[in-house]
Image: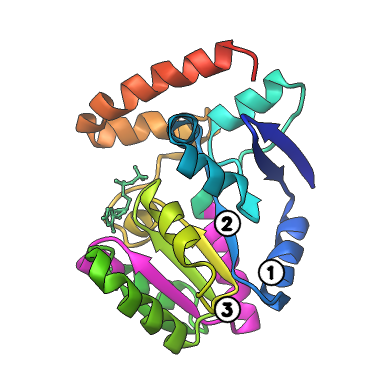
Amino acid sequence: MLNVDILGIKFSSLDDDEFKKLVLSFIESNKCNTIFTPNAEMLVMANENPEFKKVLYESDLNIPDGIGIALLAKRKGRVIKRFPGIEAMEKILSLAEIYGFPIFFLGAKEEVVEKLVENVKLKYPKLLVAGFRNGYFSDEEEKKIIKMINESGAKILFVALGAPKQELFINKYKGVLKVKIAMGVGGSFDILSGVKRRAPWMFRKLGLEWFYRILQEPKRIFVRFPRLVKFLSIYTRNV
Ligand code: UDP
C-alpha cells in the first residue's frame, strides 16, 4: 500500500489483495470505518471548506477516484493507480456476498435505490440486503434513519447523497452507527441501477470519465468548469 499526502489529505493506493485485507480488517474492528473516494472536484471543495477537509483528513481510507488525484500525486513524484469509487463499491459487494456481510443502501431517488437493490440481488444472488432508504430526507428524519440502519443488522453502509453531503453525513453519525464500514459512493447508485451509464471504456482509459458525465448532463458544466479552473490552479502551484 502506498500513501500519498495531497493538500493535507492522505490517499492510499492499494492493489486488490491489500484492499480485500483492509476491508476484512475494518469488518473485524470495533468501530465504524469510513471510506471516501475523493476526486479533483472534491479536492477543490475541500480546499474551500475546512469542515469537509477535516472530514477527509480524518477518514480511515481515501482512495483516489479520478485522474486529477493521480496527476497531483505524479507531481510529487509518486505513481498511484486510480481506483474509481464504483469499482471499490463492486469489490466490497463481492466480498460481502462471499463472507455474508449484510449491506444497507442509503441514497438516490426512491425508484433508483429500488432498482439498484433489484440489480445487485441479480448480480450477487447470495448478497444479504439488510435494508435501503432513498436519499431525500429532512434533518429531523436523520435520527430515525440511523436507528433504521442500526436495527437492520447491516455491517456495511453505502451512502449516495453527492459530495460533500454524504461525507459530512457519515462523519456526523460514525460515532453512533453500528456498521463497520460506511462508504460515500456519489453517483454509483445511479449507475448500478441502470439509470445512468458509466463512461465507455475509452473515456475511462483516458481518464475522461468526468468529461463523459458533462456530456451526459451538459448543465453540470456551469458547476464543474469553475472547479476545473480552480483544480488547474492547485495543480500548477506546489501541492
Ligand atoms: N442525492 C440524494 N440526496 C440529496 C442529493 C443527492 O440522494 O439530497 C443523490 C442523487 O439522487 C444521486 C447522488 O446523490 O443519486 C449523487 O448526486 P450527484 O450526481 O449530484 O452528486 P455527485 O456525483 O456530483 O457528487
Q: Residue furthest right?
A: 1
Q: Nearer the viewer, mark 2 or mark 3?
A: 2
Q: Are marks 2 and 1 in contact (CB under 8 Å)?
A: yes
**Percent coordinates x, y for residue 49 in the rendering:** 43, 35
The residue lying toward the viewer, choosing from 34 and 126, is 34
Magenta segment includes 109: yes
Relative horizontal placement of residue 134, taking residue 148 as reference (left or right)? left
Who's the residue at 52% across and 50% down the image?
85
- Measure how far apart labels 1 and 3 are at the Cα level: 16 Å
Residue identifier under label 2? 35
Of mark 2 and mark 1, the one earlier in the sequence is 1
Q: Nearer the viewer, mark 1 or mark 3?
A: 1
Who's the residue at 49% across and 59% down the image?
171
Residue identifier under label 1? 26
Judge: label 2 CB < 8 Å from ligand 1: no
Residue identifier under label 3? 97
